[in-house]
C-alpha cells in the first residue's frame, strides 16, 4: 500500500518506521520506503492485509532481521551513511561473519578518497570486483597487508584482532590520536592476542570499539 505523507518529515529514498493497527487493536511494526508517486511523496508498505497504518518520521532501515538485534542502532547508522548494505533488499544478515574485503570496503567508503588507487600485488584481487578499488586504496595507504606478498584473501573471514589492527591503522592514517591504550590483562585470553595486534587491541578496547 502507498500511504501519502506531506513531505515535511520525510525524504525520498529513506525508510521510516510504520505501525500497522489491526481491527482487534493489535499493533505490528514494520518499515516503509519513501518514494515519489505522481509528484507526491508516499510511504510504500509491504503488507498481507489492509489495516490502519501509522507512518512515523523515525528513520530506520529496511531490514527485517535487525529490529530486535543488539546491533540494531549500529546497523541503522552504517546503512543510513552508505557504509554497509544488506545481503539483499530486505536482509542485513547481522550474524554472518565479516570478510577481509567487507571491512576494507567499509573503511574505503568512510574515507571517500577523491582519487582511485590501482597499485597492488594481489593476484586474487582482479579489477572490476566490488572490493577492488577498496583493497588497492587500503594497500597503498598501508592499512592492510596480504596474507602473503601476492595474496589478499578477500573472501576469508576476518578475526577480531585483525579487524582491530586494520581500524587502528586507518585511524592513524586519518590523523587520529591512537596513543591512549587500555590495560587488557583482566581478560582471561589476553595471552592469545598476537604480538602484532597487541597495541591495536589495547587502543580499540580503550576507545570502546571492542
Image (cartoon, helix red, strand yellow):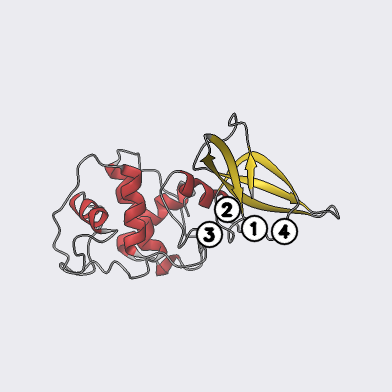
**What label sits on residue 49 in the rendered view?**
4
Local packing at callout 3 (Cα closer than 10 Å; few below 14, some 14-19, many 20+) is few
| Mark 3: secondary structure | loop
- Sequence-wise, the earlier of marks 1 and 3 is 1
| Mark 4: secondary structure | loop
> What residue is pinned by disc 1?
68
Give the foreground label among 1 and 3. 3
| Mark 1: secondary structure | loop
Please provide percent x and percent y for residue 192: 41, 69
How far is disc 3 from disc 4 in space, using C-alphas? 19 Å
What residue is drawn where x is 18% and y is 51%?
A: 140
Please provide percent x and percent y for residue 177: 35, 39
Please provide percent x and percent y for residue 201: 40, 56
What residue is drawn where x is 15% and y is 58%?
A: 120
Q: Are the residues at dot 1 and dot 2 in contact (C-beta closer than 8 Å)?
A: yes
| Mark 2: secondary structure | helix
Is residue 41 visible in the rendered image? The answer is yes
**What label sits on residue 156 in the rendered view?**
none
How far is disc 4 from disc 2 in space, using C-alphas? 27 Å
Give the foreground label among 3 and 2. 3
> What residue is pinned by disc 2?
72
How far is disc 1 from disc 3 in space, using C-alphas? 15 Å
Q: Please name whichever residue, 151 or 113, is drawn nearer the observer in this view of the structure.
A: 113
Amino acid at each position: 500500500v502507498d500511504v501519502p505523507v506531506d513531505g515535511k518529515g520525510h525524504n525520498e529514498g529513506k525508510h521510516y518506521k510504520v505501525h500497522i493497527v489491526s481491527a482487534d487493536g493489535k499493533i505490528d511494526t514494520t518499515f516503509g520506503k519513501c518514494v515519489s508517486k505522481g509528484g507526491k511523496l508516499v510511504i510504500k508498505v509491504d503488507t498481507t492485509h489492509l489495516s490502519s497504518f501509522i507512518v512515523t518520521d523515525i528513520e530506520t532501515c529496511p531490514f527485517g532481521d535487525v529490529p530486535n538485534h543488539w546491533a540494531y542502532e549500529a546497523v541503522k547508522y552504517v546503512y543510513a551513511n552508505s557504509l554497509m548494505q544488506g545481503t539483499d533488499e530486505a536482509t542485513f544478515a547481522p550474524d554472518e561473519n565479516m570478510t577481509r574485503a567487507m571491512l576494507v570496503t567499509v573503511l574505503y567508503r568512510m574515507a571517500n578518497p577523491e582519487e582511485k588507487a590501482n597499485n597492488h600485488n594481489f593476484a586474487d584481487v582482479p579489477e572490476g570486483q566490488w572490493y577492488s578499488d577498496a583493497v588497492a586504496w587500503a594497500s597503498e595507504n598501508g592499512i592492510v597487508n596480504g596474507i602473503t606478498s601476492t595474496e589478499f584473501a578477500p573472501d576469508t573471514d576476518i578475526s577480531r584482532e585483525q579487524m582491530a589492527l586494520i581500524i587502528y591503522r586507518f585511524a592513524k592514517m586519518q590523523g587520529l590520536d591512537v596513543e591512549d591504550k587500555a590495560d587488557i590483562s583482566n581478560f582471561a585470553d589476553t595471552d592469545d592476542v598476537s604480538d602484532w595486534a597487541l597495541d591495536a587491541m589495547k587502543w580499540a578496547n580503550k576507545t570502546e570499539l571492542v
